[in-house]
Image (cartoon, rainbow, N blue to C red):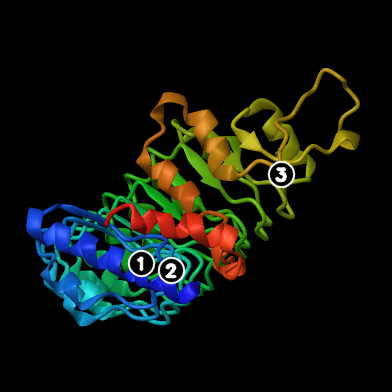
């Protein structure tokens, strides 16, 4: 049954590629097809501007992908890539790139060739180093590298003057580079779940910051009220689950600064009229942001949520029940209807 399904699946993929070539189409969606390799015919789909290859079993990308010079959107998340495909760096018109949930522990210096890139997601890949050449991607507005093994950020990150949304949640960062304060366009900063020992006062220079997540770090010193007054647009500063978060000084500051989130310590106050901002650990930070942002929500926030808590080891129900004909027949009908 699997052989039959594979036959229909393969021919369906080829038919879609041929249709793109014949119609000179701009978009091709080949996600969720359990592909282990791309068909060679993909090299002839030169009209493509959007290519979705996510949720497959791809272990490598053929160099011919670099022929698709018009490509602006490329989704490769949830595959089985062991290296960043170097041919991607030839796609100099790329604006949106997602390689999350693969096995990519390093990025090539050639990433800097993607000077048109506006959004880059490399979440949950085991990434250890962010190359300094990322600074060449001067139009980058959204950068997601959460769930990795980063211990440092390059000094050159400060050159990303258009960066609005940055998350490095759940890494191993102990400090930020001195240039970090140059990110004057930053609105959303998520450094939750790292190893920061001090409150990063570099962010005081970021006048546009609205949402800052520093929870679950090792921060020993708290910002003062005068510090926070410099962040005039700040809507949320999450400092919960840090050594400093339960100390009386910060608890009292949170009483008056309603945009500070810390866990409640009831025993510090006996006046029942005092209510501090509570941290809600069961609510995902990006969902919290969406509520706070109201009408200002944009694709930046939505794309953050997509790969925020993804499990790259999870396999589809189809694969787990591949011998079950009750599952196989609906899957096969997906392809049969096109012939």
Image-quadrant location for residue 24: bottom left
Reading the chain from its start, which is encountered first: label 1 or label 3?
1
| Vertical order, 189 against 53 (above or below) | above
- Near mark 3 (Cα within 10 A), the count class, few <14, some 14-19 or many ≥20, is few
- Image coordinates of residue 5 in percent, x first then y, are 43, 68
Q: Nearer the viewer, residue 41 or 89?
A: 41
Q: In the rendering, which numbered label is found on residue 8? A: 1
Q: Nearer the viewer, residue 41 or 164?
A: 41
Q: Quadrant of the C terminus?
A: bottom left
- Dot 2 falls on a residue whose secondary structure is helix
Image-quadrant location for residue 51: bottom left
Marks 2 and 1, how far apart at CA? 5 Å
- Image coordinates of residue 228 in percent, x first then y, are 53, 37
Q: Are marks 2 and 1 in contact (CB under 8 Å)?
A: yes
**What residue lies at 44% left-to-right and 76% top-to-bottom?**
3
**What residue lies at 59% left-to-right and 58% top-to-bottom?**
326
Marks 2 and 3, how far apart at CA? 44 Å
Q: Is residue 226 visible?
A: no
**What residue lies at 40% left-to-right and 80% top-to-bottom?**
59
Marks 1 and 3, how far apart at CA? 46 Å
- Image coordinates of residue 291 in percent, x first then y, are 54, 30
Q: Nearer the viewer, residue 109 or 155?
A: 109
Q: Nearer the viewer, residue 263 or 22?
A: 22
| Vertical order, 188 against 152 (above or below) | above
């Amino acid at each position: 049954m699997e052989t039959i399904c594979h036959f229909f699946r393969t021919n369906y993929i080829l038919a879609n590629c041929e249709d793109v070539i014949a119609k000179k189409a701009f978009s091709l969606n080949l996600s969720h097809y359990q592909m282990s390799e791309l068909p060679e015919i993909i090299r002839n789909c030169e009209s493509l501007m959007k290519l979705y290859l996510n949720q497959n079993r791809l272990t490598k990308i053929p160099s011919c992908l670099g022929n698709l010079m018009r490509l602006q959107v490329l989704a490769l998340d949830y595959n089985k890539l062991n290296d960043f495909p170097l041919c991607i760096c030839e796609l100099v018109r790329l604006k949106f790139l997602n390689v999350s949930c693969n096995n990519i522990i390093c990025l090539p210096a050639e990433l800097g060739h993607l000077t048109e890139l506006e959004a880059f997601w490399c979440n949950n890949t085991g990434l250890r180093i962010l190359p300094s050449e990322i600074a060449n991607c001067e139009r980058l507005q959204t950068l997601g590298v959460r769930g990795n093994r980063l211990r440092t950020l390059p000094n050159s990150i400060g050159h990303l003057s258009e960066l609005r949304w940055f998350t490095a949640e759940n890494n191993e960062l102990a400090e930020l580079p001195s240039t970090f304060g140059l990110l004057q366009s930053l609105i959303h900063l998520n450094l939750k779940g790292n190893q920061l020992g001090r409150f990063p006062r570099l962010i005081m220079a970021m006048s546009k910051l609205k949402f800052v997540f520093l929870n679950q770090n090792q921060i020993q010193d708290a910002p003062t009220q005068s510090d926070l007054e410099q962040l005039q647009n700040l809507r949320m500063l999450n400092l919960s689950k840090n050594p400093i978060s339960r100390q009386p000084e910060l608890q009292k500051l949170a009483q008056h600064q309603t945009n500070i989130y810390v866990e409640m310590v009831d025993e510090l106050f006996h006046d029942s009229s005092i209510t501090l901002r509570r941290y809600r650990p069961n609510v995902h930070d990006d969902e919290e942001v969406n509520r706070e942002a109201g009408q200002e929500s944009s694709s930046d926030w939505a794309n953050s949520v997509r790969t925020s808590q993804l499990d790259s080891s999870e396999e589809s129900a189809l694969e787990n029940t591949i011998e079950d004909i009750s599952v196989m027949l609906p899957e096969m009908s997906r392809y049969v209807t096109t012939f």
